[in-house]
Amino acid sequence: MRLLVVAGPPSAGKTAVVKQVIRHLGGEMQPAYLKIDVVRAFEDEEIAREFGIPTKKVYSGDLCPDHAGIMIMREAMEWAGREGADLLIVESAGLCLRCSPYVTQSLGIVVLSAISGTHAPLKMGPMIALADMAVVTRTDLVSQAEKEVFRERIREVAPEIEIVETNAVQGTGLRYLFRRVAGTPAIGDPDRVVLRGVPPLGVCTVCVGKKEIGWQHHFGVVRRLEGTDLFFRGE
Amino acid sequence: MDHQATEITLLPGSDKNGETEHFDQIVIRPGETLAIVGPTGSGKSALINDIEVFAQKDTVTGRTVLVNGRAPPEEYVRDPAKKPVALITQNTKCLADLQVQEFLEMHLRSRKIEEEGVVEETIALANEFTGEKITPGARMTSLSGGQTRSLMVADAILISNTPVIILDEVENAGIFKDRVIEVLRTYQKAVVFVTHDPLVALLCDRRVVMRNGTVVRVIEATGVELEALEQVRAVDGFLCMLREEIRAGKIITGDLHHLSPPGEVNAA
Ligand SMILES: Nc1nc2c(ncn2[C@@H]2O[C@H](COP(=O)(O)OP(=O)(O)OP(=O)(O)O)[C@@H](O)[C@H]2O)c(=O)[nH]1
Ligand SMILES: [Zn+2]
Ligand SMILES: [Zn+2]
């Protein structure tokens, strides 16, 4: 089974890209689709209805969707295997922007909207830097020069990344993405699938539920207003 | 690649019923202009899309686009610096946060162009196309539709420097279309206009007529429309002058003959 991990900011066009992949490769491969979202998602039902493939969703709630994805990735592969899939597509809502959901032995795709502003790629760090490929959507709404400037911004974050530009609704220009998906090797050893990048520095006591404000009330890795140094408080 | 010698060939696809389109091939050569006309929803956007992505029977229309008579190499499609086509969209949803100057500098950097003065030159050329002056410090997002489009055309000529330029409905933006066409001709660009504007359509060397998603006719400018063109030019010049008077806050009364003296053609 091949694994495709699709991430990107809200409304970037992730589902539109996923649908194109299913539409074009669904004949050669048997896809299964998992959507990881925060509180509500309908894409799984929509895709099941449109393509008749196994789909599933999971809500991350208080957790960053990318973290939630990592927790359940193992089970997701087992589920897709039981469903007879040979391509598992995981779409993550990716919101915290400090981490990234990509794992080894998979193809990692970040979806970005060309109209999201020139600074957007610079704010997305690991979500772009650790991906194999960037799919830029809504290029139907911008002119040539704008595409090139946006591309330059992506390259500032990830100089080597493969970039594909598309109108994701129509699927133009995606032949290079399909080729890449088709050429992705199947997962060799599921036990050895690991995260590509290190997750952000631990958690703090805010993350585990303390409500007090001020670093004095917390322990773990903390920070003060003045100076950018992080320091450790506690045992 | 000799940018200036690029020739684009469009081969027919098929309509919704699987019938082949009514043309053998449409070739766009340097210095030539092509208009695409037809009602809304007739497939004009899909056609320019096919050209922009160099369709290889892999779009909904089933068309094929060749560059210099051959299937384009992958780098033409994927590397913007090598791509011979620049599309200027109707939408002017520009990238936020940048000033005109920063935007152009970043574009130059992405193209690895180090010549001096290109930014100033591009803004100056853009200002030939629009009545509202663009300044280097203006925010991209604060530009009007006409200003953005003028800037994108100037950029396509001087920075992208592509041999083929596609302009999607340039007329609605308040931009001097005669001047744009004239400049594009001097730079030996092959230009494709998607247009509803009679003047733009008649000024082009050829006119592709679209209906129901397919090309139904290609009309060559053989000279039979020349007389009509002169009249349209006069009417267009008249309307442009009138627009300027209205914009200037004048009251429009009586005989308007002073706006277009007989025999003299006003460039828009
Ligand atoms: N014009 C245009 N619209 C697009 C493009 N890609 C996506 N859209 C539209 O943008 C909207 C959002 O696209 P989705 O694919 O749902 O985005 P998403 O990233 O999956 O969104 P979430 O999962 O809700 O975060 C939809 O209405 C799409 O039809 C594109 O390339 N061009
Ligand atoms: Zn996270
Ligand atoms: Zn925390």
Image: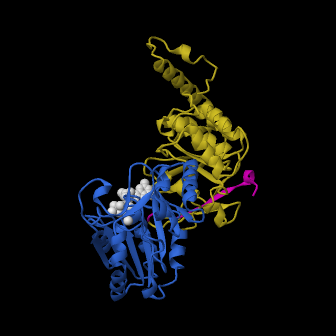
Q: Is residue B102 left or right of residue A106?
A: right
The furthest residue to the front: A235
**B64 vs A48: above or below:** above
- Looking at the rendered image, the quarter that the C terminus of chain B falls into is top right
Position in image of residue A102 (x %, y %): 45, 72
Figure coloring: by chain
Residue lying at the far top of the rendered structure: B254
* x, y percent for residue B33: 64, 45
**Range of magenta residues:** B1-16
Identify the residue shown where x is 32% and y is 56%: A215
Report the residue at 47% width, 49% height from top: A117
Closer to the camera in the image, B103 or A27: B103
Quadrant of the image occupied by residue B100: top right
From the viewer's side, name the closer residue of A64 and A235.
Answer: A235
In the rendered image of the structure, the colour used to display chain A is blue
- Res B24 seen here: no
Ligand 1 sits in which quadrant? bottom left
Q: Residue drawn at (38%, 73%), measured in percent from left and top?
A: A90
Is A208 left, or right, of B73 in this rendering? left
